[in-house]
Amino acid sequence: MEADTSRIEEYLESIYKLQQEQHPVSTSRLAEHLKLSPPSVSEMVKKLAHKGLVNQIEKGVCLTEEGSRMAKKVIRRHRLSERLLTDVLGFKWDEVHDEACRLEHAISPEIEDRIAESLGNPKTCPHGHPIPDKDGVFVKEIVRPLSELKAREKGIIVSVFEEDPKMLQYLASLGLIPDVCVEVEEVAPFGGPLIVCVSGSRYALGREVASKIKVK
Amino acid sequence: MEADTSRIEEYLESIYKLQQEQHPVSTSRLAEHLKLSPPSVSEMVKKLAHKGLVNQIEKGVCLTEEGSRMAKKVIRRHRLSERLLTDVLGFKWDEVHDEACRLEHAISPEIEDRIAESLGNPKTCPHGHPIPDKDGVFVKEIVRPLSELKAREKGIIVSVFEEDPKMLQYLASLGLIPDVCVEVEEVAPFGGPLIVCVSGSRYALGREVASKIKVK
DNA sequence: CCCATAAATTAGGTATACCTAATAAGTAAA
DNA sequence: TTTACTTATTAGGTATACCTAATTTATGGG
């Protein structure tokens, strides 16, 4: 039984990400995220379970210890790739996700090490997500979605949970990027927009978008 | 008919390289180089021909205009990857070939451009081979194998036609790397070794090895 | 020119990862 | 509790790229 490592990594990475929002990950959710049909995913998940990378429990799949370890390695390579692309090759933060999706499967542990080393062991990717260390350990900041701040509350942007280039461009154009201080001036009722103040400018921001911006 | 681009690139790259030593490339030679069985290669070559990437002539295959164009793109990505690895990430010249073999399939035209740009459009890979430009054009230096120099002749190393890490380490330890001046002091008869002088030191070098070092 | 050998292809078969359509299993509302 | 619906899985089938064994096609020596 010879495996397609890239494909396995893709599944593990997706499961890992989806686990963060919903614990046992459902087949359909995973299929949607991977843009595959549910039966394909069902079948593949069975293979992953057989390899000891996931457990199929009642309401979905969850990573085993080893699956989690592998997933974090892929995520480390993904995020280090993103950093290399922005910091060394001059890419913008909205251009790096798709590129890194391909690079993460082509990067050896040696390249991984060298990238980390030459960038001074960065702690986060350009979107503010933590880069696990070689042992899969990373600091998880305690954050709140910007959408949950009350009027007059301030926060520093930690990360932006978004992959769509258009949206990332938009956010960057408003200056809504990690490490920036943002203040909520008012919150419109009935799920309406937030009025936020970023580096001297005032903008109206939808709840949906604001929920993807994590602050501390 | 949906294709595995990486596999196609692998074939084209191999054909391109083998063409340089033997013009129409034989199935068996190609199979050997790709470490696949001749029937597998025979079959795949048929598909490549169907896609208009190679022509199957009497005594083997040769790249079409388009096949050649694609091959040179892969080679460009390969060699730029190698340069990135040595110049930016601090790898040694013997470590980069295998890594680049994986990276070359994961690098988009955008990354390719950025690497070229941030390295100042390098003209050669760390082994001295030319990097084709975006249109597949590259300067081909007129070179001679070191093994063909007569006693007392001098030359400047242009490139080293070798991929084996052990051999590359050995050559680097003698200082036999591109841009270095080397003088043949004497040539032992009956296909014996050459005595060469490199930056003040004298070494005996087998004909086989010397034939892989190209000088001008 | 024919035969031995080397090279290329055809025949037949495997594994992986995907698909659609059909079925089964769970869940929630009537 | 039965129905209606959603979600997961099974069944059956496709494409790609590989393999070994058998056959065909070239090629060069006698």
Image (cartoon, coloured by chain):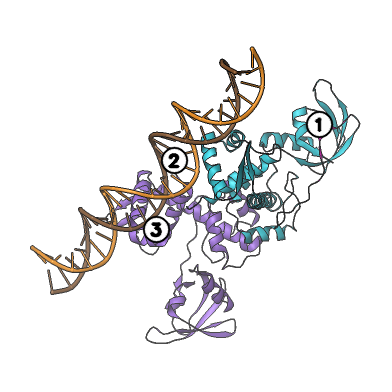
Chain colours: A cyan, B purple, C orange, D brown
Q: Where, quadrant-wise, is the N terminus of chain B in this rendering?
A: top left
Label 3, label 1: how far apart the Cα atoms are: 57 Å
Disc 2 crowd rating (10 Å Cα; few below 14, some 14-19, many 20+) is: few
- The residue segment tinted magenta is A141-150
Label 2, label 1: how far apart the Cα atoms are: 44 Å
Which residue carries the number 3 mark? B36
Q: Is residue A21 above or below residue B143?
A: above
Disc 1 crowd rating (10 Å Cα; few below 14, some 14-19, many 20+) is: many
Mark 3 and mark 1 on one chain: no
Mark 2 and mark 1 on one chain: no
* Mark sitting on residue A147: 1
Disc 3 crowd rating (10 Å Cα; few below 14, some 14-19, many 20+) is: few
Q: Position of residue B97 (x, y in %)?
A: 54, 63
Residues A62 and A147: in front is A62
**Quick check: marks 3 and 2 in contact, CB under 8 Å?**
no
Residue B139 falls left or right of residue A88: left
Residue B151 falls left or right of residue A80: left
Residues A129 and B182: in front is A129
Residue B90 located within the stretch drawn in magenta: no
Q: Is residue A113 above or below residue A5?
A: below
What residue do we see at 70% from left, 54% from top? A136
Which residue carries the number 2 mark? B2
What residue do we see at 54% from left, 38% from top? A42
Q: Mark 2 is on which residue type?
A: Glu
Q: Secondary structure at mark 3?
A: loop
